[in-house]
Amino acid sequence: MKTRGVSTAACLTVTALLVASCSGGGGDEGGDGGPVTLKFQSLSDQPAAIEATEKIVGEWNDAHPDVQVEIVPTGWDGVYDKLITQFNGGAAPDVIHYEAASIVPFARDGYLADLSEYMSDERKQDIPEGVLDSVTVDDQIVAYPTELQSYMVFANKKLLTDAGVEIPTGDTMTWDQLREIAKATTKGKTYGLGWGLSSPTAAFMTLAPGFGGEYFSGTGQDAQITVGDGEMALPELVDAMAYQDKSILPVTLTQSGSEAIASFYAGQTAMTVQGSYQAANIAKDAPKDLEWVVLPPLAGPEGAGQAANPQTLSVNIDSEHVEESAEFIEFFTEADNLAALNEADALIPATTSAQKVMADKLGDENGWSTILASGQHFVSAPYLFADAYAQWKDTVATPAYQRFLAQETDAAGLQTQLTDGWDEITQ
Amino acid sequence: MRVLVRPAQYVALAGYIVFLGFPLLWLISASVKSSAELNSLTVSLLPSQWHWDNYAQALARQGLMSSAANSLVVALASTVLVILIAMPAAYVLARLKGAIRVAGVGWILVSQVFPVILIILPLFLILRTMNLTDSLVGLTLVHTTYTLPFALWMLQGYVVGIPTELEEAGSMDGATRLTVLRRIVFPLLAPGIVATAMFSFVSSWNEFFFALVLLQSPENYTLPITLTSFIGGEGKVALGPLAAGSFLAAIPSIVFFSIMQKKLTGGLMAGAVKG
């Protein structure tokens, strides 16, 4: 009886391993003379974006029988660790989808091909300078930018009009205007603004250019930090709105953007600052009686600039088919393709031509004309090129900003923590 | 007063069960709510409208069912391997004294202190040399290796709890060492084996990082990898379909636990008393 139990277990193991081995092993490229197969590691996560990606790849495969592209879908979670292991183990895919902030270190370590000579002049001219800068490392273009998000203000039209506020129009609106509207709409249990700043570093970094804030100068290990008036302007403004004006719903400062949106739906906040992609979610999830608008891009004293950290497509330097991979990406980033993908992802295309295609198609639906117009304000993001940025962000900046927003430290303390923390990390 | 003790015990027990089961209840609740409801300030366990579409979306997600099958194969295979290796090894560890025991215990402790991130690259290179990356066989071996030390430690605690007098009695009756193991030790070890098997199964079923790094082809993805595809970039999370997929993913574990529950409880109690 017992022997039978052990035998059953052994049989089960052998069977399971046989099943496993039958399904194991990935496809590989064809032999001599066969078509080249490019592995394209895609992070597309929305069903519509997956469909759009498959459609683009399908069209490429139909038109290029000798160069077939195979999509390898991967999630965002843990992808950095996966890629670093793949690069070191010589098993990285040919075409890599990832965000600029994360591929710059890979480029510096020599894992990504220089695409400068493969990117067409037409494409180079089509990508706004600040966006192209974000994928240029040591004068080499290491990726094609594809999708971006900007920070936009979504407003409850009724609450604004009830407060006697004229809804801003025009190309941009100032931060002072935002502050005034927030004050005017703060009444009773309604706050003027909800802003999910539980992880505030990305928002402060992205919006700092409007105040002349750059945070970093130099690149790589030589990058230096500066936390001056331009860098401190936005955190201090948020602090003033939250604690002097009392026009920011306090709990939202401890929430993520997605969490903060619930109070906007409930009419507890008249406005909310969100990533532009939330336009699609608001259109889908907002209560039917909530009439909302997207306000013009926010502008500081130095303009409406927002630091660009686009999603990108890059090529593994060890790929045997760098040229074919670049040709595929060139096809992938054609205006119609990029517009379709960004529409599916509710993001802003990285090329001017794709922005135009999308604008023509969507018109002013769900504030898209305003959101797409913000695409012209993207500027280079110096933090992308500071080697220790990721570590500084997680261990120094985010906790320091959180303490500041909780009034556990003052502006001078924040300034000191940000600079001293950087010095400690980079020493 | 005494009359009140028993109801109070049941109330306390019920409260404890609700406390333990609440995350699962909340998961089920989230899996049948629309994204509008999930993003509203109204908090309710029962949905205002049942939104079964989340399950349709989760099942429509590329490869969810095949990922579940892959997870099941890997979890079952690694569980059986772990038990087959751990049973004799635990006996040796528990019964023999001297250098073997010291080395065994040392190996177990050392293997537990290494962060996964440190071993993943050499492991990847070794498996690549053996052509076992992107393979469920390779993943099964990794799960087996990774789970084995703790399983061994767990099982040897149960072996220690079996009186040596029983083995000596068997020997006195003329049984060989192998017969003693087969007829006396291993049957008495059943609760411990069940508990260890449960641990191994759940560890493999939920394992994410090795699977993420080692598996390259979608057809080989395990369930945790496929489930993360509901979490997107830019903070986007498809919460409803994720909850539906996660609940579906939890079902095999729940079924496995339900079947093994009685023996598992006995095994844990035996370990608590003797281990």
Image (cartoon, rainbow, N blue to C red):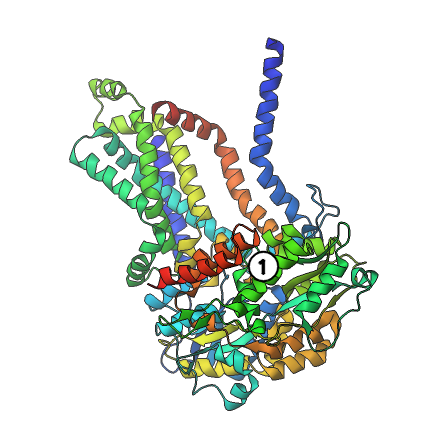
Q: Residue A308: image x %, image y %?
A: 54, 73
Name the chain under label 1.
B
Q: Is residue B148 above or below residue A186?
A: above
Q: Is residue A45 visible?
A: no
* Most distant residue in the front direction: A412
Residue B260 appears left or right of B95: right
Given residues A16 and A209, the one toward you in this image is A209
Residue A24 falls in image quadrant: bottom left
Judging by the rendered image, the residue that carries numbered circle 1 is B61
| Quarter of the image where the N terminus of chain A is located | top left
Which residue is located at x 64 percent, y 51 percent? A250
| Quarter of the image where the C terminus of chain A is located | bottom left
Which residue is located at x 60 percent, y 64 percent? A46
How many residues crowd mark 1 within 10 Å: few (<14), some (14–19), many (20+)?
some
Which residue is located at x 46 percent, y 82 percent? A326
Q: Is residue A123 visible?
A: yes
Q: Which type of secondary structure does the marked residue at label 1 adopt?
A: loop
* Most distant residue in the left direction: B99
Given residues A124 and A229, the one toward you in this image is A229
Q: Is residue B64 above or below residue B266?
A: below
Q: Residue B169: image x %, image y %?
A: 24, 17
Q: Residue A304: image x %, image y %?
A: 62, 75
Q: Is residue A35 above or below residue A258?
A: below
Q: Residue B30: image x %, image y %?
A: 64, 47
